[in-house]
Every structure is written in C-alpha cells, then in structure tokens.
Amino acid sequence: MNRGKVRNHALYFLGVLTYVVALIPFLTVNLVRTLILAPIIIYTLPIMEYLQPKVMSLKIGYKDILLMIPPIIPYVFLPYNEQSIYILIPLALMLLTFTLYLAKYTMWGNVIGTAFEASISIVWGLFVHNFLFLIPSIYWLLYIFVGALYVEYKIPFRRLNKRIVQISWIISLVSLIVLSLKNPITLITLLEPSTRYLIPGEKLKSTKEIKDLGKRGSKRDMLFVALLAITYTFSIVFPI
C-alpha cells in the first residue's frame, strides 16, 4: 500500500452529498434499496478516484474498463418508467467529459466531470424508487456545475472570466425558478449561492489559498444540501 497516496477528499465528499440528495425528500424511498445502495457507493467512489487521472490523461486500459463494470451492474435493475429518460443527463455529461479531455480542454473537462458526479443523484434516486428526485437533483446539479466554474475562476492561473460564472448562474437561477413554481419555498436554498456566484469577487492571490477555498466551499455545500432537504420536504408535506 502506498502510504503517501493523497486521497481525493473532494470526490468522496461530493459523492456522499450526492447520495443524500438522491434521497430527498426521504418520503417515498425504498429503505431496502437505500441500504443496498450504500455499499455500492462505497465501492464506486474509490473506483472513480482511481480512474479519474486515467480519464484525464486518456490512458484507460482493458483492466480499467473491467473495473467499471461492477458498479454499473446494480443499475440494470432500475425501475423503467417515464422518469428513466432522465438517465440521459448523466450519460450525456459523462460523454461530454471524455470528449473535452480528448480535445485537451482540461479545465472544462474538470468542470463537466464534477457536474457528472453530481448528476449521478438522478440514477441513485431512480434506484431507491424516489419518485420525487427530480427537483433536488436538478438543484444539486446546477449548483455544483456553477460551483465548479466558480472554483476554476478563483484559481490564479486560470483564464476564466467571472462573467461566465455570473451568466451560468443567472441561466440556472431562471431554470430553477421555473422548475419550482409548485415548490417556491425551495428557492430559499438559492439565496447564499446567488450572492457567491453573482458577486464572485477577485481571483485568489496565491495557490496556497485554494485549500481554504475548498474548506469554505465544503461548509457551504453542506448548508445547501441541508436547506434543500428541509425546504423541499416541507413543500411536499405542506403543499401550497
């Protein structure tokens, strides 16, 4: 074992929160499937961590492809109904991630790859029979996508204009407002990220500040998921 290996804590953190989002609003999920999903995720996340640098460098071998198969098998048993079409979202993001890395657009590959991990909440939501998964999953996906852009903008050596972050969030905000017409209280979740993404501030002065940026971002991510869970569950239990 390589004791010097640095774990990708951000990937694991995002994976755990994505699992929680897949269960929101916790009212219709199948408890047995929810418990079964946990060890599947425990296996899947280290595989994703192992394969991530290989995908980025496009050095995937046959053994790597074999490693991808076990995490996919359980999803053969997804319930197939009108909601199954939403699986196309993570599939499209995964293919786009590969395409961007192939075209040497590494930064955009990182952003879309992060969004892809967040979008797996759609697959997991279907797996646990959470028939109310769509709104929380879309909230989470757009929040993480713009958040990844925000982080890339803040990195000193990235040539990313803050207007891209702002415009991306405005488009996301409009989409989420339309999606939340029947659940307006859920929009409370968007207050904090709106301030952060619409007024992103200046770039970091040093790469040494990236770690602190990540720590603050993790706390905000947990706050976002907590507010999303509370407001969306409340809107379902007490509909307008």
Image: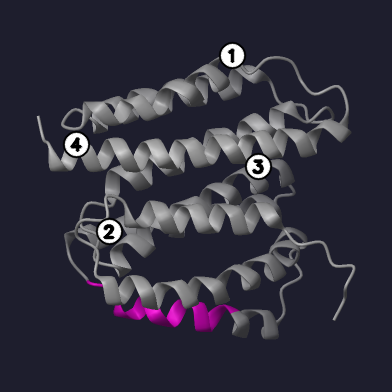
Main SS of residues in magenta? helix
CA separation, marks 2 and 4?
25 Å
Q: Which residue is mark 1?
A: 199
Q: Which residue is mark 4?
A: 235
Residue type at mark 3 is Trp
Q: Nearer the viewer, mark 2 or mark 4?
A: 4
Q: Nearer the viewer, mark 1 or mark 3?
A: 1
Bounds of the magenta segment: 68-79
Residue at the image position 20 percent from the left and 32 percent from the top: 183
Q: Which residue is mark 3?
A: 108
CA separation, marks 4 and 3?
35 Å
CB contact under 8 Å: marks 1 and 2: no
* Residue 151, x across and y down, in percent: 68, 33
Residue type at mark 4 is Ser
CA separation, marks 1 and 4?
29 Å
Q: Nearer the viewer, residue 5 or 104?
A: 5
Question: First in sequence: mark 1 or mark 3?
Answer: 3
Residue at the image position 72 percent from the left and 80 percent from the top: 61
Neighbour class for label 3 at 10 Å: few (<14), some, many (≥20)? some
Q: For residue 122, which quarter of the picture?
A: bottom left
